């Protein structure tokens, strides 16, 4: 349930609404907006006596939130959420943010080389797994803490923000100490203890859609993060299981406009895991931008043939550079821009 306050409501009136909700045994969350403040009622068991709240001064209207997810929904918050990273990258506004990097951090040379190339092409967020979820227990599963340190070094050298995956609740704090944003991978989308811990980490979260999760399940997983008080959440469409085997997954581009209508959270697309095939990554990245994605996550490796994971879907740096040029044009065609990279910013400095 959402209590919308009048434009003229005073802080005292908002406080009175919050107090009343708490007296009734529910939790209250004030949501300041550009036009007016709203107060969300959490823990609604369907038996809330709304009349008591409707009668309070300063209250404009009481809205029932009909979706099973509450704080994630557009009903709860009309304005789009913008997630801000410490290097100034803003995801969810008019500008598209591109996150790129290897599937896994493999060595200092590898991550430093690719970070420099990606920065030059205009990416502002560096991705790279230090803890890797692998389908086979015998596959390379990441450098662990050393991988996190290398990512932090690449951030220092380039100014890019860093996003990397936390696989289990126990490693959330460690990942939060090194990264600017914590990735929750597809296999963990419904790992509720992990979601709760990540929600309390104080870091923005990149939540990837589960391999066979519905859009409602994705939004409910995000609700766990917001329920812990963290609204800095980006959703990621990364492909779902399908019956066709020409691609590894089916990149569900419809999820982008569907999520945009249902939720205020930003959504980006990952055409790398979404297709699993290098030659399909660029076309689907272009399509995702055209569909309204707030950004992309793309795997790029300095030497994909020798990559320790996901080489077959990793772009060559040159291909990534060309992709960036193409999406700049596509973004413009739909009234958006790709966020300027560091090189462009320094070139335009007085
Ligand atoms: C990844 O981003 O490297 C990854 C493992 O992605 P997903 O969880 O979408 O498979
Ligand atoms: Mn990967």
Image (spheres, rainbow, N blue to C red):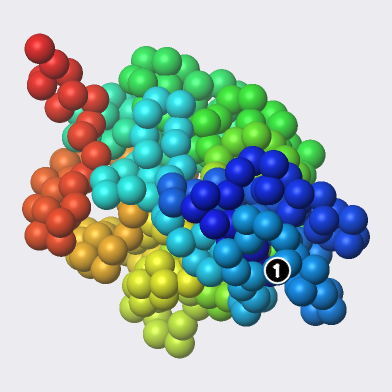
Residue under label 1: 54
| Residue 80 visible in the snapshot | yes
Going 80% across and 68% down the picture, which residue do you hit?
52
Counting every numbered tag in the picture gives 1
From the top left corner, tell me how far across and down residue 14 is, in percent.
Answer: 67, 48
Q: Is mark 1 within 8 Å of ligand 1?
A: no
In the rendered image, the residue lying farthest to the top is: 350
Could you tell me which secondary element the residue under label 1 belongs to? helix
> Within the image, what quadrant is residue 5 found in?
bottom right
| Residue 110 visible in the snapshot | no
> Within the image, what quadrant is residue 79 found in?
bottom left
Going 21% across and 34% down the picture, which residue do you hit?
340
> Within the image, what quadrant is residue 285 found in?
bottom left
Give the quadrant of the N terminus.
bottom right
Going 61% across and 43% down the picture, which residue do you hit?
10
In the rendered image, the residue lying farthest to the bottom is: 243
From the top left corner, tell me how far across and down residue 157 is, in percent.
Answer: 37, 15
Q: Left or right: where does residue 277 sit relative to residue 105?
A: left
Going 40% across and 67% down the picture, which residue do you hit?
260
Nearer to me, 71 or 190: 71
Rate crowding at label 1 as few (under 14), some (14 to 19) or many (20 or more) other CA atoms within 10 Å: some
Q: Is residue 153 above or below residue 338?
A: above
Nearer to me, 247 or 21: 21
From the top left corner, tell me how far across and down residue 78 is, in percent.
Answer: 46, 61
Nearer to me, 328 or 271: 328
Nearer to me, 137 or 343: 343
From the top left corner, tell me how far across and down residue 95 is, in percent.
Answer: 26, 46
Q: Is residue 246 above or below residue 59?
A: below
Give the quadrant of the C terminus.
top left
Q: Left or right: where does residue 183 sit relative to residue 91?
A: right
Q: Is residue 42 above or below residue 128?
A: below
């Amino acid at each position: 349930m959402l209590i919308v306050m009048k434009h003229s409501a005073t802080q005292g009136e908002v406080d009175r609404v919050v107090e009343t909700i708490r007296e009734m045994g529910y939790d209250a969350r004030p949501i300041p907006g550009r036009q007016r403040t709203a107060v969300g009622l959490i823990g609604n068991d369907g038996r809330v006596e709304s009349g008591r709240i409707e009668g309070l001064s300063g209250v404009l209207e009481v809205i029932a939130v009909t979706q099973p997810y509450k704080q994630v929904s557009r009903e709860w918050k009309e304005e789009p959420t913008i997630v801000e990273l410490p290097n100034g990258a803003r995801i969810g506004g008019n500008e598209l943010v591109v996150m790129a990097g290897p599937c896994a951090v493999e060595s200092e040379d590898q991550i430093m080389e690719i970070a420099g190339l990606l920065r030059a092409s205009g990416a502002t967020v560096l991705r790279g797994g230090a803890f890797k979820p692998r389908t086979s227990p015998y596959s390379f599963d990441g450098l662990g803490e050393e991988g996190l340190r290398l990512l932090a070094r690449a951030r220092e050298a380039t100014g890019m923000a860093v996003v990397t995956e936390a696989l289990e609740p126990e490693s959330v704090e460690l990942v939060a100490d090194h990264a600017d944003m914590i990735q929750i991978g597809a296999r963990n989308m419904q790992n509720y203890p992990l979601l709760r811990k990540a929600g309390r980490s104080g870091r923005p979260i990149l939540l990837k859609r589960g391999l066979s999760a519905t859009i409602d399940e994705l939004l409910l997983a995000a609700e766990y993060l917001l329920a812990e008080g963290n609204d800095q959440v980006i959703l990621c469409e990364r492909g779902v299981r399908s019956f066709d085997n020409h691609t590894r997954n089916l990149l569900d581009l419809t999820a982008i406009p569907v999520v945009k209508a249902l939720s205020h959270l930003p959504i980006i697309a990952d055409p790398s895991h979404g297709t699993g095939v290098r030659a399909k990554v660029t076309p689907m990245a272009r399509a995702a931008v055209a569909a309204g994605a707030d950004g992309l996550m793309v795997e790029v490796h300095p030497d994909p043939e020798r990559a320790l994971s996901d080489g077959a879907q990793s772009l060559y740096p040159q291909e990534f550079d060309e992709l960036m040029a193409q999406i700049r044009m596509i973004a413009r065609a739909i009234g958006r821009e790709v966020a300027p990279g560091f090189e462009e910013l320094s070139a335009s400095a007085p």
